[in-house]
Image (cartoon, rainbow, N blue to C red):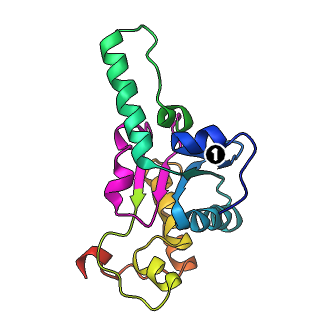
Amino acid sequence: QPDLPEGAREGIIRGMYTLRRAEAAQVRLLGAGTILLEVIAAAELLERDFGITAEVLSVTSFSELAREAVAVERENRLSAAEAPAQSHVETLLAGPAPVIAASDYVRAVAAQIAPFVPARYVILGTDGFGRSANRKALRRFFEVDRQHIALAAIEALVRDGTLDRAVLTRAIDTFGIDAATAAPWTL
């Protein structure tokens, strides 16, 4: 894990904190557990190879984020306040930049916060049965390595109309991704 950023203690307890800010971030990358290092590397790939700026957030607990968001949603429903409260997720992920969540949990774990993410939300996880000789190969197999995380970000930007589809094709080639490979959960 990277060193604790100044002022991150409260976010760690609440379930998510900003690890790396980016001026005018085009995309936000969420990393949980050991995949956080792959997320950081994906942000670097996006910047270096495609000029795409990414903000990186560390998720310490999708479950805690979901619990708090549901509690805020209930509070808003019952209070009928003119200015509804916002959950930690809604506050940190406000705005239109696509959000890519990557972890070595099944995708259902990160899906807990989907109703509270206002932008396009793409989840990468380890659904399926993995058979690999080492962690690097296992991450590639489950498509949660840095290249697949960066590719998911590029694809989200293409879908939002921010990038040309040719950039996605170039990224597949640049990252050495075999588009014909079967999805991990089908093997």
Task: Establish if 68 lies above or below 97.
Answer: above
Seen from the viewer's position, the closer of residues 38 and 26 is 38
Quadrant in which the N terminus is drawn: bottom right
Task: Establish if 134 lies above or below 164.
Answer: below
Q: Is residue 97 magenta?
A: yes
Q: Quadrant of residue 68?
A: top left
Q: Position of residue 129 (x, y in %)?
A: 30, 79
Q: Position of residue 178 (x, y in %)?
A: 42, 82
Residue located farthest toward the right when viewing the structure as drawn:
6
Q: Position of residue 166 (x, y in %)?
A: 51, 66
Can residue 57 be seen from the camera position used here? yes
Side of 30 where 80 appears, left or right? left
- Span shown in magenta: 94-122
Seen from the viewer's position, the closer of residues 54 and 85 is 85
Q: Indicate the amino acid at tag 1.
A: Thr
Name the residue tied to disc 1. 18
Residue located farthest toward the left when viewing the structure as drawn:
186
Label 1 crowd bin: few (<14), some (14–19), many (20+), radius 10 Å: many
Side of 3 where 135 appears, left or right? left
